[in-house]
Image: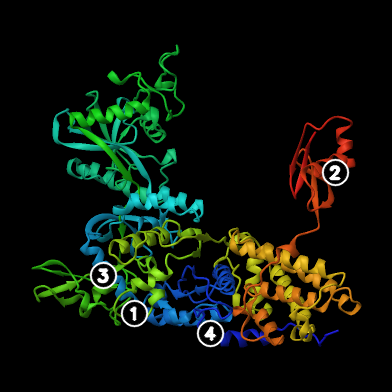
Amino acid sequence: MNETREKDYRPEEFESRWAELWAGREWGAKPAAKAARGRYYVLEMLPYPSGTLHMGHVRNYAIGDALARYMRMRGYEVMHPMGWDSFGLPAENAAIRNRTHPREWTLGNIAHMKRQDQRFGFSYDWSREVTTCLPEYYRWNQWFFLQFYRRGLAFRKKGTVNWCPKCATVLANEQVAGGVCWRHEDTAVERRELDQWYFRITHYAEELLQGLEELPEWPERVRAMQRNWIGRSEGAEVDFAALDGRGGELGEELRVFTTRIDTIFGAAAVLLAPEHPFLARHLGTAEAERARALVTARAAGFDPEAAANKEGFFTGLYAHNPFNGERLPVWAANFVLTGYGTGAVMAVPAHDQRDFEFCRKYRIPFRQVIDPVAPETAHAAPRAEELAEAFSGEGWLIASGGFSGLANREAIARMTAEAERRGFGNAKVTYRLQDWGISRQRYWGTPIPIVYCEQCGVVPVPEEDLPVLLPEAVALTGEGQSPLASSAEFVNTTCPECGGAARRETDTMDTFVDSSWYFYRYLDAHNDQAPYDPAVATQWLPVDQYIGGIEHAILHLIYMRFFTRVMRDLGLVEFAEPVRRLFTQGMITRGGAKMSKSKGNVVDPETLIEKYGADATRMYVLFAAPPEKDFDWNDQGVEGIHRFLGRVYRLATRRAELMRGGGAAGGPRTAPGDVALLRQAHQVLARVTEDFEGRWHFNTSIALCMELTNALYGCEPGLETGGVSPAAFAAALRILVQMLAPFAPFLAQELWREWGQAGEIAAAAWPEADADLARADEIEIVIQLNGKPRSRFTVAAAAGEEELRRRALADEKVTAALGGRQAKKVVVVPGRLVNVVV
């Protein structure tokens, strides 16, 4: 009945046809199915154009595209753009290797990766495409720099910076992990003194921290990483008078930051960061060389938590403890950092583990001043020499002068007040977060719009002179100073203020500047008067759903939050947080290892398309595991998805006449199998809809679609015998194909065409689950004995708790376990299980 000749599933015959058609499609248009419910902005992190998509890209984009397609079918106007984070060191290094210009290499890669995106059927609105290495984009990087500069948020200073010898450029603190470069895990980072440009992100430290509480739909792991990176510490700053080797005053103070002023009577030494300015002023040549050696060694993979790594030396100088008058030795210590607090700490070995390890190593004597036992309790006084490790917990002060006997929390407040009253200290909040160094000594980046004039000093380039263009003819060697410094044409200019001779800044901006605001530019990509129109941004922002890797938690994701706050203060937006909901997808490995060319375990997406098709490839990365989990690649898995799609295709083409005819239009559904088939179809539809709206368990959604396909195959003979009506069969098959449309868009669209449906399935309304049809007459209840499944029974869906309890206790396995005794406890979870505690 209503059977036509089935077709073999050959995705290569129709996928490329639809891909070519969709390449010119304006996916941002309002849905045709119904009036738009509202706007929805779904965004995947834009890629670096390295030359080809990898499977991590495919997974990222398959997740975002499935959501974008679903939301369009739900009736939303969807913003789903794509662009290219196209400045950066890899292009420059590739240009050196291949003797080609970075622009040529980059734009060639973009063209290839864009074709790959289109071949996968990712529904991006290419009319909004952004390429960050083009002047029409980086002009606005420079514009933002000028706004930051005018507000005191962009500034230049000499500082100790991270230097990667292989990159031949500065790295931000966030780009150093374990003492090595984030790009070159075999290259130890050095510390150098350089004049650098910074963005004052610390101005927003507290707001960035508090704002995390306004992001309940961000992963807690990301929020925790940002909290830790911002690193808020409440404490006090205390001035220790510096003394020479004989105890004479040097006429300056060593300001120490501590979160435990209650332990100051137990201070055994003052420890300074090796690069602390005090040491540069007072150390002799030999000691200064020792300090520099500590800095160099620290950069080479230093782990401050490893006891063996703690190194230092006595400087021959002393400091006066203002609370008890003791003279404390001043040491240089490699685990004290200039970027945290003041770069000086008091060592309290009895109550800080790092201090404990350092002082035990160098045999610096110390005492215990916090007792974990209340003073009214009779006990022996603790002895510092008996400690196996530092006691860092709460307690009561001992050996602390007039503060002895106080609970340490009360003592902190009183001692801070005492320091303020006597004028040698004050309460202080500090942050681990440091200002963002944006200067890079490379060519392929945004030129910093600053000139240096002997008469006028540092002068910003006027806005009307933007963009400051990268020169084309520059020698790239990967060594020495910034390549821009070798271009006399670029360097030599005139001062905008006095008209005299001046020279341009030759550093370029960190490429994380480019990615801190690109999602705003998508909204108004062709605006040549402003980075974007605030009125347009208001319509779409904040981003409803952002999708990317966890590795960006403390780089890109914190920088974009900072940029948005500056935009707010500039009057460009009215909100502080740019993204409502964040999702971090898991990694795809192969053979248990991260995919890389050097390991020879890379999976080529184009090869998979040729063999299995784009639908099977993108659907497999959604099916293999929940999208937030890592999974190991399996060739048999994508082959299995290919076979499943083939089953759907053959069934749907075999029944094309039914779908084109009256069967799909409705009619009586009275055949014996109708209720069961439609119930399963609507149950699956309800679950898949729920997954899209909430938990994103696309793997279970696809598995349910497989089960529904099996049910349709099982019901198909009933079309001939009357076991299932054509109307019910057609309705279930239509639901199946519409549910597959976000996951396998080429297959769904081809079947839509085969069925003679008007327009595109992407514009059709998402089907609505019928709650009455989906409701089961009977349900299966699991019986647990002491929490372990032991039996099951079927019962009416409307059965109450007492009925479930009675049926469970009557089960033969339960009665055997009870052996005539009463159950200790019976826990009923309606609709799911009964747990009998024996």
Q: Residues within 10 Å of mark 1 (few under 14, many from 20)?
A: few
Q: Nearer the viewer, mark 4 or mark 2?
A: 2
Q: Secondary structure at mark 3?
A: loop
Left or right relative to 392: residue 831: right
Q: Position of residue 173 (x, y in %)?
A: 36, 55
Choose the circle earlier in sequence order: 1 or 3.
3
The quadrant where residue 488 appears? bottom left
Q: Position of residue 106 (x, y in %)?
A: 42, 78
Q: Secondary structure at mark 2?
A: helix
Q: Nearer the viewer, mark 3 or mark 2?
A: 2
Q: Residue at x 56, y 71 (%)?
A: 71
- Let me know if residue 632 appears in the view: no
The residue that mark 4 highlights is 23
The residue that mark 3 highlights is 448
| Residue type highlighted by circle 3 | Ile
Choose the circle earlier in sequence order: 3 or 2.
3
Q: Which mark is residue 55?
A: none
Mark 1 near mark 2, Cβ–Cβ under 8 Å? Answer: no
The residue that mark 2 highlights is 807
